[in-house]
Each structure stands twice: as C-alpha cells, then as structure tokens.
Image (cartoon, grey):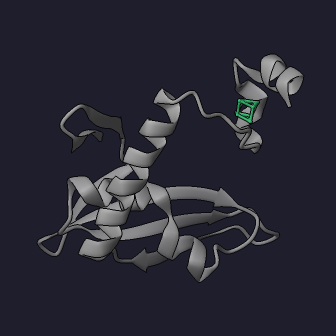
Amino acid sequence: MPITIPVAKDFQIIGYIDLLTEEDGKRVITDWKTCKKRPNPDDVAQNMQLSTYNLAYPDAELRIAAVLKQKKPAVEFYPTTRTYDQRKRTVKTFCAVKQSIEAGVFYPREGWWCECCGFREQCKKDF
Ligand code: SF4
C-alpha cells in the first residue's frame, strides 16, 4: 500500500506499507520480516517502519509478521503499539535526519543494504 506522510511543511515521507488490512472492523498494519531468530521485544517496540506507518494511520493496530527461517519454518505475529509521544519522537527524528542531510553530515551505517549501495566505493574510500 503506497503512503505519503507529510512530516513537516517542507517535506514528506513516501513509501509502502507491506500489508494494510481490515480485521474485525479495525485497521491493521503488518510489516513482514524474514529472520533466523525471533525478534526481541525491543526490536518490535522500536521498529522504525511501524512507527512511520503509524504516523499515517495513528489508530491502526501494528504488528510484525516474522517469517522464521529455522529448521521448522514458521510465521509468528508480534503485535505492538505506539503512543502520541512516540509518534512525535519519530517526526523529530526525521526532521533531525533531514537537517543532517542538508548540512552534509554523513557517517556510514553499514548493513546488508551496503551490498546494493551505489555509493559503496566512495564510502569505502572516505571511511
Ligand atoms: S556502503 Fe552505502 S549504505 Fe553502506 S554505509 Fe556506505 S553509504 Fe551507507
């Protein structure tokens, strides 16, 4: 489901929600994760994607659907919530990131995504 979230007067977040459903009259946002280990409660409580989607749908129920790549594969659901203060913090985080980008602040944040990053060579050279 495509979403556009106005974060501040001068910018918006554009993205996609993995799954948006209506269940028992309630809107439910599901973010799929494929993982070897079960997500821990902090991962679920602080998941930035769900926090961001919650800005677009503050009344929605949120959950991670973890596809566990284990000997016995399974799909497990991890429900979570966000408060008004958490949504406010998410907006402030986006604003801080935007200010950093505009100020030319950069530091590497490495992960699996580096594999397909177009700036990889430059990043290796600079750091
Ligand atoms: S390789 Fe790309 S994604 Fe990885 S840290 Fe450097 S700039 Fe970021």
| Residue 58 left/right relative to 53 | left
The location of residue 80, given as percent across then percent down, is 40, 77
- Reply above or below: 104 against 67: above
The location of residue 31, given as percent across then percent down, is 45, 57
Q: Which quarter of the image is occupied by the C terminus?
A: top right
| Residue 106 left/right relative to 11 | right
- Reply above or below: 34 against 115: below
Q: Is residue 18 visible?
A: yes
Residue farthest to the left? 25
Question: Residue, x 48% and y 67% (percent of image)?
Answer: 64
Residue farthest to the bottom? 41
| Residue 71 left/right relative to 13 | right
| Observer-nearest of 18 and 74 | 18
Question: Residue, x 50% and y 70% (percent of image)?
Answer: 46
Quarter, ligand 1: top right
Residue 58 position by quadrant? bottom left
Residue farthest to the front? 103
| Observer-nearest of 33 and 85 | 85
Q: Is residue 30 visible?
A: no
The location of residue 115, given as percent across then percent down, is 78, 30
| Residue 31 left/right relative to 36 | left
Question: Residue, x 18% and y 37% (percent of image)?
Answer: 9
- Reply above or below: 88 against 93: below
The location of residue 105, given as percent across then percent down, is 60, 34
